[in-house]
Image: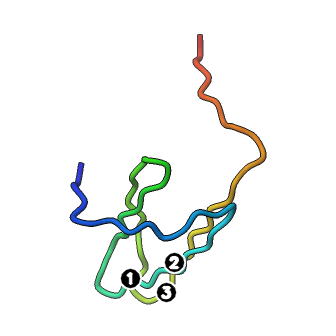
């Protein structure tokens, strides 16, 4: 796991759209609801990430 040097609280909303430009960077390190992930970035094109709230909670279901 990678430790964050600093984090920025960007927004609190029902929906958000991020447009990221990679350039020399190959990944964006993001975190939402305490869950970190690495998102690949394109060197030439913008990467668009849309996060929306769903009207119901998702559940983990065991296969038993």
Can you give x and y, in whole percent of width and height, for residue 19 in the image? 54, 80
The residue drawn where x is 44% and y is 66% is 9
- Gap in angstroms between the C-alphas marked 1 and 3: 8 Å
Q: Residue at x 56, y 69 (%)?
A: 49
Q: Picture quarter containing residue 18?
A: bottom right
Reply above or below: 21 against 27: below
The residue pinned by badge 1 equals 22
> Which residue in the rendered view is the most extreme toward the right?
55
Say few, some or many: other residues with alpha carbon within 10 Å of mark 1 (under 14 / 14 to 19 / 20 or more): some
Residue 27 image-quadrant placement: bottom left
Judge by depth and name the residue closer to the eye, 31 or 25. Answer: 31
Identified at 43% across, 47% down, the residue is 34
Q: In this view, does 10 lie to the left or right of 6?
A: right
Residue visible at 43% across and 79% down? 42
The 10 Å Cα crowd at callout 2, few under 14, some 14 to 19, many 20 or more, is some
- Can you identify the residue that label 3 sits on? 45
- Looking at the rendered structure, which numbered label has been put on residue 39? none
Residue 51 percent coordinates (x, y): 62, 62
Q: Do the residues labelled 2 and 1 touch (CB within 8 Å)?
A: yes
Q: Mark 2 points at which residue?
A: 47
Mark 1 lies on a secondary structure that is loop
């Amino acid at each position: 796991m990678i430790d964050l040097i600093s984090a920025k609280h960007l927004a609190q909303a029902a929906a958000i759209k991020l447009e990221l430009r990679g350039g020399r960077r190959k990944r964006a390190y993001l975190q939402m609801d305490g869950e970190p992930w690495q998102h690949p970035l394109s060197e030439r094109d913008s990467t668009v990430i849309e996060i929306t709230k769903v009207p119901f909670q998702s559940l983990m279901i065991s296969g038993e």
